Amino acid sequence: MNGDAGAVDLTGFLTLTRREVLRFLRRPANTFAPPFITNVLYFSVFGVILGERVGTITGVPYILFILPGLVVLGAVSNSFENASFSIFHGRWNEYIHEVLTSPLSYAGMVGAYVLSAATRGLLVGGLIAAIGWAIVSALFRPVPVEKPAYLLAFMLVITLLFASLGVIGGLAASDFDDLTVMNQFILRPLVFFGAVFYSLEDLTPLLRDVSLLNPMVYMVNGVRYGFLGVAEVDPRLSLAVLAGMTAAAVGIDVLLFKRGYGLTD
Amino acid sequence: MTNALEVEDLRKSYGDLDALKGVSLTVPEGSFFGLLGPNGAGKTTFINVLVGLVRASGGDARVFGHDVEDDYRKARDRIGLAPQEFNVDRFFPIHEVLEHKAGYHGVPHDVAAERAERALKQVGIYDKRDTRFDWLSGGMKRRFMLARALVTDPDLLILDEPSAGVDVQLRRDLWDLVTELNERGTTVLLTTHYIEEAERLCDEVAILDRGRVVTVASPEDLMDRGTDRVVVTLRDPPASAASLSAVLPGDDRIEDVSLEEGRLVVTARQGGLVAPDLVRELDRAGHEILDMEIKRTSLEEVFVDMTRHDEGDEDGRDDANEGAPDDAPLETAAPGGGEGSR
């Protein structure tokens, strides 16, 4: 081998991670401009214009209330999209063979795809937070970060989780339309019904109970807890459940790579 | 000596379709080995099993002693593959694609950059290093495929139709480069439709057909099995070939004597050896020879003959696997079975 197995795997993992990160960094018009524009619109329309009518939710201005949810929306959708697109595009054009025919371990391959996709999710989440911070600070007050450790932990876990799910999506897709379906018809409804724009307290008991089946509720709730220090669901329980889901999703990714699901004939 | 490749009873099925039906091959280290076969013979499936892009349904394959599934990381690290399809990362300039490929094989970034530069120079497209693959010409793309296979310093270089669609000059450049690599110790496994390529480059070739190995032999041995045509132009050719058939009685190398457009055509094995006897006997019989041409059988003709399928030849044979005789008559060597595919 070109070195011992461990060193080969580490170098291979770092190379693939670097390749994946460079891919989205070098195309900001495709990766960062859309969430930038979309979120400027979200904050302007929902936060500023509608926010004035809504007033406050859970004691904070509406625009501040929706900020964590928008950060989650951007972070998870970009994590998912990056992993699913990168893998599916590589499959579609078969250049994923460059990775598959290498001595990189399956865990190393998955780790690189997941970590790089989560990095994009974190960067987009940070970008949205910066947009919200700029608008909210200008109109009301500086955006607080009451529980920074929780905020960081939740952001890490949810981006890793959706990056891992994106890997599954990229392996399962048989057409580019499948990626659109996953993003538009599964991911976005979950996010929009995940208490991004409203409080669970505003729902009827039945709808509130149904909402609690949506994992997105726990993510939005956790990130909101990180920013505002208020939570409608116990953040420690949310974090533990989400971390468990992430570990399971990564495990499934590795298993699928090992079995060659969507990758080998 | 270690074998670069040891394959035993390798099988691959896609549902009812058997692409590989028990292929067994041994490729010695340092050899230049050709894998010939018509479309659908199973060549690409065979190669893809070695590099992990296809999962075998049965059998074993080892690369330098490493099982391609159980010890896949060591096996893949020894292989450099230039596939037929242009499966190249389109997002990056080609020098970065090479750096990435080397990196996946554990080569540190600075060394990978040096190797990428060297590989691009080797194949003659260094001045295009900052270009993305899509913007290369067809010939340059083919060169790049070889560069990508070389950037990991492979011990086993697998070339799947490397000269498909390239011009004569480029083909010769590729031949020279690959020959040089082979002379320096790299084992080469080549699949090609250009029989001339195998004839010129390979120490040994395996003919694969419908998922089975038909035979393994050197190109020279294979050509010796074919029949040559000795075409003789006579000043006064007879009306029929019957009188000429008696010219060389008892020579079992001669398979047929005929007249075609007034010229004598003798079909024989080892036509070059038959020709002097033929000239002598014709002269002795009083025929004046105006011209003579020996049309040596080509490997291509042997190949076509061995992979020709007749109705009802479902029960093919695999007479060239290790330990099996590879000098069976050509007529019985054509295997049967279903169509293979990649």
Image (cartoon, coloured by chain):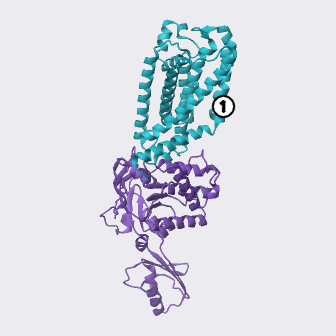
Chain colours: A cyan, B purple
Query: Which percent across, then down, holds residue B152?
Result: 48, 54
Q: Nearer the viewer, residue A55 or B125?
A: A55
What subunit carries mark 1?
A: A
Regarding mark 1 in the picture, which secondary structure is present there?
Answer: helix
Quarter assignment of residue B327: bottom left
Question: For this view, does B90 lie left or right of residue A261?
Answer: right
Q: Residue at position x 67%, y 21% from top?
A: A134
Q: Nearer the viewer, residue A161 or B293?
A: A161
Query: Which percent across, then down, holds residue A69?
Result: 57, 19
Q: Looking at the picture, which amino acid does disc 1 mark?
A: Ala
Q: Nearer the viewer, residue B323 or B130?
A: B130
Residue B47 seen: yes
Q: Nearer the viewer, residue B37 or A152?
A: A152
Quarter assignment of residue A39: top right
In the depicted structure, whether residue A200 falls above or below residue B194: above
- Residue annotated with mark 1: A33
Query: Which percent across, then down, holds residue B46?
Result: 42, 53
Question: For this view, does B261 lie left or right of residue B284?
Answer: right
Residue A262 seen: no
Number of other residues with Cα within 10 Å of mark 1, as a class: few under 14, some 14 to 19, many 20 or more: few
